[in-house]
Image (cartoon, helix red, strand yellow):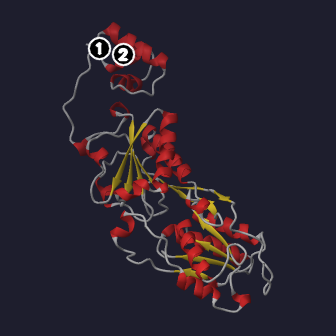
Amino acid sequence: MATVTDIARHAGVSVGTVSRVLNGATNISPDNLDSVQRAISKLGYKKHLPAPKPLMARKFAAGDRTGNIGMVFAGAGQAWTNHPLFAAYTLGVEQACQQSGVHALVEISSDDSVLPRCVVERKIDGLLVKSTSTVPAFVKQLPADLPVVFIGLNDPSVALPQVAPDSLGSGWLVADYLWQRGHRRIAFVCTNATHPQFITRQQGIEGYLRQRDGYDPALVIMRKAEGDDSKSRRSAPESTPPDLEAEVKQLFFRSAGQRPTAIVTANDWMAHGLYRALARHGLRVPQDVSVVGFDNMEPLCAVLEPALTSYDVSFAAQSKAAAFDLFHLIENPAHRQENSVRLVRGNIVERQSVQHPLPVGSSA
């Protein structure tokens, strides 16, 4: 009886190509597919079906491909599915899949200890894990040969590929944007002091200002989030903007020359809360103080009055890049355990919340 090697020799292709044809893979050129099918017909090859393999023994190799990848939002509840972040991340993955002829199976996982369903049911060739600050517990249970790429994580100690925003660079660029427009008293306000990306954004701003001898630690307010360590904090997005009354008092209840002329918030949702607190104290944006956010969340930035200038973190670009990295790992098993962090840079989207600062003591 003819073997796979016989088919490959007769068709003039590799054994791997014959294996992919026999298992219904789609990433095969029409010429090679035709040659293999002709050889199978001529030599009378009959595929031998092996006994089913246990889940953890299953090999995610070329011959077992499903044509699917999984994407799991770790530590997130169903409420996140209505959030713009969820839409942006899934959009990037779908774009990459459409370009590559692959399907994405997207899951929400509120319990980090439970394996994603797409893994348990053996439906995928690789897995994307959206997680910002921690490695979910289920990662230790994944098959050793399953390709995995993290989205949003930037942790050099994790021995798996990661794609994350260039938070340090984004902070630097926002500081430069304001500096070039005449601002020298630049504040940073954050209501979640332990969030990795928020920390790094502040560090980027601080680094830029220190190089220009313009850094004032009194203008940095990093508040620890309420319930900072609880799972409920991550499982659903906040329903109301944070109250920044105390932060506004701390920044503006001082002499005019010590007040900020611009405030950067760690994200757009915090900017929303800042707008409210500033308005309660009769402070106008941008006449009295300019404001810049992070994330460029539509439609929030557009509906704020005035419309918020924000740094677009390019969530879709991150997930799209991660998907292409995953495709590469599926094709190149030797690279699957490489420790790498790829940073994706975004851009500032200008609206109406920034203007050149007025001289101290003057009014618009």
Q: Is residue 121 left or right of residue 314?
A: left
Give the residue at x 52% y 35%.
99
The residue that disc 2 covers is 7
Q: Which residue type carries mark 1?
A: Tyr
Quarter of the image for residue 138 reads bottom left
Could you classify mark 1 by the number of other residues whose Cα lies within 10 Å: few (under 14), some (14-19), or many (20 or more)?
some
Up the image or down, 32 lies above or below 51; here it is: above
Residue 228 figure quarter: bottom left
Distance from disc 2 to disc 1, alpha carbons, whole Å, reads 8 Å
Q: Foreground residue, 99 or 91?
A: 91
Q: Is residue 117 left or right of residue 91?
A: left
Q: How many marks?
A: 2
- Judge whether 135 appears above or below 26 on screen: below
**Quadrant into which the C terminus falls:** bottom right
Percent x, y of residue 190? 54, 75
Give the residue at mark 1: 45
Identified by mark 2, the residue type is Ile
N-terminal-most mark, 2 or 1: 2
